[in-house]
Image (cartoon, helix red, strand yellow):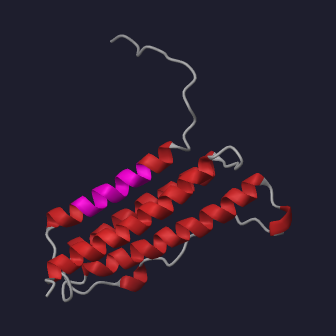
């Protein structure tokens, strides 16, 4: 029979793998056929990072967990009202990014459910390992959206 720690590790790995898969789909949005602004990217990955930190706190606090405090989806603050058939490349990016980030938020919410100590046991090192991997994936995908450097400059001498 599977121990509570083995169950935590199995389910945690599966849920983080699903987040990785959706983040890979978000990475595809960095392709040239999509148009995005720096504000879009800041909001998208800022939300990703903030929710990761919020989720990790559930594992650190004692007492009952509060699952319903985690959001259930993601939407950009400035909504577009354009008909989907006449969307621009920017509107397509926003629509797909919202849908995909909402899937990440949903999977992160499920990952947060693992903080329930009445069903799972885990060590602080296991939690750290999960969230270091979560943050690293976010940083790797966000780097794909960063503008490429076009020139080199030396640092000023001290």
Residue drawn at (43%, 65%) of the image? 19
In this rendering, is residue 116 above or below 86? below
Residue extending farthest front: 1
Q: Which residues are magenta?
A: 129-139
Residue found at the very far top of the displayed protein: 157
Residue positioned 76% across, 53% down in the render: 89
Q: Main secondary structure of the magenta part?
A: helix
The image quadrant of residue 111 is bottom left
Whole-percent x, y for residue 2 in the image:
16, 84
Left or right: 89 as drawn, with respect to 117: right
Residue found at x 25% / y 74%: 10
Tell me: 112 left or right of 146. Answer: left
Q: Nearer the viewer, residue 49 or 103?
A: 103
Instruction: State left or right for residue 141 relative to residue 95.
Output: left
Residue 75 in view here: no
Task: Measuring from the top left, give residue 85's x and y in whole percent.
Answer: 84, 66
| Viewport quadrant of the C terminus | top left
In x, y percent, where is residue 33? 71, 47
Q: Quadrant of residue 107?
A: bottom left
């Amino acid at each position: 029979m599977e121990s509570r720690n083995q169950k935590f590790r199995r389910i945690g790995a599966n849920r983080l793998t699903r987040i990785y898969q959706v983040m890979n789909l978000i990475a595809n949005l960095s392709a040239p056929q999509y148009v995005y602004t720096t504000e879009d990217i800041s909001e998208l990955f800022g939300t990703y990072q903030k929710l990761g930190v919020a989720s990790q706190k559930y594992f650190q606090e004692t007492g009952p967990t509060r699952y319903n405090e985690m959001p259930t989806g993601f939407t950009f603050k400035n909504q577009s009202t354009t008909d989907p058939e006449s969307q621009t490349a920017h509107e397509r990016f926003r629509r797909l990014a919202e849908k995909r980030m909402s899937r990440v938020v949903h999977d992160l919410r499920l990952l947060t459910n693992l903080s329930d100590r009445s069903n799972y046991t885990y060590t602080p090192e296991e939690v750290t390992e999960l969230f270091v991997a979560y943050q690293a994936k976010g940083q790797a995908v966000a780097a794909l959206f960063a503008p490429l450097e076009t020139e080199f400059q030396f640092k000023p001498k001290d």
